[in-house]
Image (tube, rainbow, N blue to C red):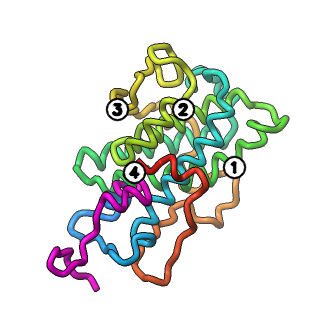
Amino acid sequence: QGRKMSKSAGNGIDPLEVIRRFGADALRFTVVAAAPLGTDILLDPNDLETSFAPGRNFANKLWNAGRLILPTLTETPVSVTAIPRDDLELADRWILSRTQRGIQAATDALEKFRLSDAANAVYHFLWDEVADWYLEQVKPRLYGQAPGGHAARAVLAYVFETAVRLLHPVMPFITEELWSQLPGEPGTPAVRGQRQPLLAAAAWPPVREECAASGPNTACPPPARCGRSSSRPVRWPRRRSWRSSGPSSDWPSWRV
């Protein structure tokens, strides 16, 4: 009905109940990403499943991407800057360029205190460009016999750890766990440079100009057909008729 939460009206939402059901990160992302400047958040106290589905589904997406990526990084990959340009395929150069754009977008938004814009920038980068496009494109090089596996692993390690760093202010718990599973021992040179034991103490990722200029900086990836939009909006719950898919079987481990 669009009414404000009120104790007397009995339409409040207990955040502890949301955390118990969906996790603290799901609560944080839903509230932050759905609250651009000058707008109200529409949450239904009688339908928490729909209200907090965006954060829950995004946490699932991030965790499942980590399950796919981390087993392929059995050894610490070389730095992405050490890969010769000729060894990088068009998809590698594209995702490196898009990563720099994602860093710049999230940094600019945070410097202007526009937390919603920062959260949505990382959301679209991780879901639309990394998970939907690049991960699918590099699977033959990661799991098959296609050449260029070392370059794909180096690029994927750099891109994923950058996404985890960018997302940490909004979703600190799941990103901290994924950070701890990245290859390389704390304090040793790795894809992150001098790795910090805790992601909370790690440096904010800088824009690498050499990567920004390494490939096409287009919204639609060149290796795939461009009929599919790569700027899909977050599906915030506006109508009760919308229902999202349920959590994966690994979700209980993220009920912080």
Which residue in the structure is indicated by mark 3?
A: 200
Q: Position of residue 83 (x, y in %)?
A: 63, 23
Residue at x 53%, y 53% (from the top left corner)? 251
Q: Alpha-carbon distance for marks 4 and 1? A: 26 Å
Amino acid type at mark 4: Asp
Amino acid type at mark 1: Glu
Question: Which of marks 3 and 1 precedes in the sequence?
Answer: 1
Residue at x 28%, y 68% (from the top left corner)? 13
Amino acid type at mark 3: Ala
Residue 152 visible somewhere in the drawing: no
Instruction: Give neighbour class at mark 2: few <14, some 14-19, many 20+ (Cα, 10 Å).
Output: many
Q: Nearer the viewer, mark 1 or mark 3?
A: 3
Question: Which of marks 3 and 2 precedes in the sequence?
Answer: 2
Q: Alpha-carbon distance for marks 1 and 2? A: 17 Å
Which residue in the structure is indicated by mark 4?
A: 25
- Describe residue 108's horizontal placement relative to residue 103 as left or right: left
Question: Do tag 3 and tag 4 residues touch (Cβ < 8 Å)?
Answer: no
Q: Position of residue 174 (x, y in %)?
A: 45, 43
- Secondary structure under the numbered disc 4 in the rendered image: helix
Question: Which of marks 2 and 4 precedes in the sequence?
Answer: 4
Residue 32, placed above or below residue 65: below
Q: Alpha-carbon distance for marks 4 and 2? A: 23 Å
Residue 131 visible somewhere in the drawing: yes
- Secondary structure under the numbered disc 1 in the rendered image: helix
Q: Nearer the viewer, mark 4 or mark 1?
A: 4
Q: Alpha-carbon distance for marks 3 and 4? A: 15 Å
Q: Alpha-carbon distance for marks 1 and 3? A: 30 Å
> Does 13 appear in magenta?
yes
Instruction: Give neighbour class at mark 4: few <14, some 14-19, many 20+ (Cα, 10 Å).
Output: many
Q: Which residues are magenta?
A: 1-28
